[in-house]
Image (spheres, rainbow, N blue to C red):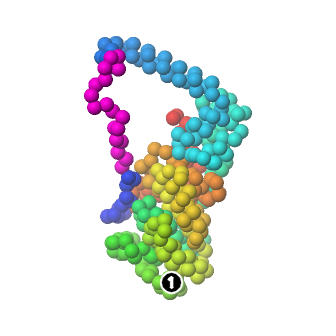
């Protein structure tokens, strides 16, 4: 398999600061509790844990279904208005946990839109990837280029506007040489129009620089470029699966111009919760076009499948 030298950036590692741990042992029963536990037989400890678990399940089962559904949504990263909307109607659901999960999976599934097989569309097309720095845009585009060229046998050209990042153009030169695809470096609007007119490629992939919240230069150039293009086009917003809901909503607003037509969920293999990124998909009906679950090119990019997504969002066995 084709493996690039430069792979996706990993999700930021989170460190836990033990600010609440006492520096010195406490007095009395709090200090003696660990010793008491050590003196208990394993069977006694297991029995105590089972009783505690049963007590917690009984308390949880006594809560209203809607409240339990909202707690479940919060645990997978879905918050705020979206959580309230998804929980609407939960009061009519049976109280057991399995029934609540089945109902919620069905509810989420009804709201998700999928846009599979983009690379198989007939005719010429332009696919542009946008998103903040570090989400895996270039690697995602390399996966699409390799899939279109090697798996589907389509001609491919890459137009990169990412001339700001150190080594970005050289990285694409290596990709282009290994894959045998065209590469054009775009610095001005005229460069884009000329490259589009010059290439005969069936699939034209556009790489863009990441941007900061107050930096509108890159997206302004991109908007002008795409407006001048008459070929069928899709603009794909790339967001990592581990991103929090509030960040997802903020970033989505930043890319209202040039406008986004579909979502790519990247770094799924690095996250424990996939609910936050759904704040980019469900409220506005933005379809999911691709899912990336690793750094390998082109193996780790997939067309979206509803059952697989639902299992990643809310596992049945969790």
Q: Which residue does the image show at 57% across and 37% down from the upper left?
A: 72
Q: In this orientation, does residue 135 appear?
A: yes
Q: Which residue does the image show at 34% across and 38% down from the upper left?
A: 18
Question: Are there few (<14), some (14-19), or many (20+) residues within 10 Å of tag 1?
Answer: some
Q: What x and y, as percent, mark residue 309? A: 55, 48
Within the image, what quadrant is residue 235 found in? Answer: bottom right
| Above or below, comparing residue 75 to residue 61 in the picture | below
Q: Which residue does the image show at 58% across and 21% down from the upper left?
A: 58
Name the residue nearer the viewer: 6 or 271: 271
Q: The magenta stretch spans which residues? A: 13-31
Name the residue nearer the viewer: 142 or 259: 259
Q: What x and y, as percent, mark residue 298? A: 43, 61
Residue 136 within the magenta-colored segment of the rendering: no
Q: Quadrant of the N terminus?
A: bottom left
Position of 111 with respect to 40 (left or right) is: right
Q: What x and y, as percent, mark residue 111? A: 65, 50
Q: In this orientation, does residue 149 appear?
A: no
Q: Which residue does the image show at 32% across and 64% down from the upper left?
A: 5
- Assign the magenta stretch its main secondary structure: loop
List the residue tagged with mark 1: 189
Q: Secondary structure at mark 1?
A: helix
Residue lying farthest front?
Answer: 27
């Amino acid at each position: 398999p084709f493996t690039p030298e430069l792979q996706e950036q990993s999700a930021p590692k989170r460190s836990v600061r033990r600010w609440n741990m006492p520096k010195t042992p406490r007095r009395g029963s709090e200090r003696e509790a660990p010793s008491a536990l050590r003196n208990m037989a394993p069977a006694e400890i297991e029995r105590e844990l089972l009783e505690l678990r049963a007590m917690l399940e009984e308390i949880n089962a006594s809560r209203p279904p809607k409240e339990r559904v909202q707690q479940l949504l919060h645990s997978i990263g879905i918050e705020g208005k979206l959580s309230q909307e998804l929980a609407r109607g939960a009061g009519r659901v049976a109280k057991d946990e399995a029934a609540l999960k089945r109902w919620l999976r069905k509810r989420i599934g009804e709201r998700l839109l999928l846009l599979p097989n983009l690379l198989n569309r007939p005719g010429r097309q332009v696919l542009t990837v946008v998103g903040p720095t570090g989400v895996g845009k270039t690697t995602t585009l390399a996966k699409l280029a390799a899939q279109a060229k090697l798996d589907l046998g389509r001609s491919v050209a890459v137009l990169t506007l990412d001339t700001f990042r150190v080594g970005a153009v050289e990285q694409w030169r290596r990709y282009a040489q290994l894959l045998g695809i065209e590469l054009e470096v775009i610095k001005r609007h005229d460069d884009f129009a000329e490259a589009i007119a010059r290439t005969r490629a069936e699939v034209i992939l556009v790489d863009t620089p990441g941007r900061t919240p107050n930096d509108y230069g890159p997206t302004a150039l991109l908007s002008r470029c795409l407006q001048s293009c008459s070929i069928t086009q899709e603009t794909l917003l790339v967001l990592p699966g581990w991103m929090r809901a509030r960040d997802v909503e903020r970033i989505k607003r930043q890319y209202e111009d040039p406008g986004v037509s579909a979502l790519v969920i990247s770094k799924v293999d690095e996250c424990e919760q996939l609910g936050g990124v759904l704040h980019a998909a469900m409220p506005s009906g933005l379809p999911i076009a691709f899912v990336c679950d690793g750094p390998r090119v082109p193996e780790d990019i997939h067309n979206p499948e509803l059952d697989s997504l639902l299992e990643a969002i809310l596992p049945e066995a969790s």
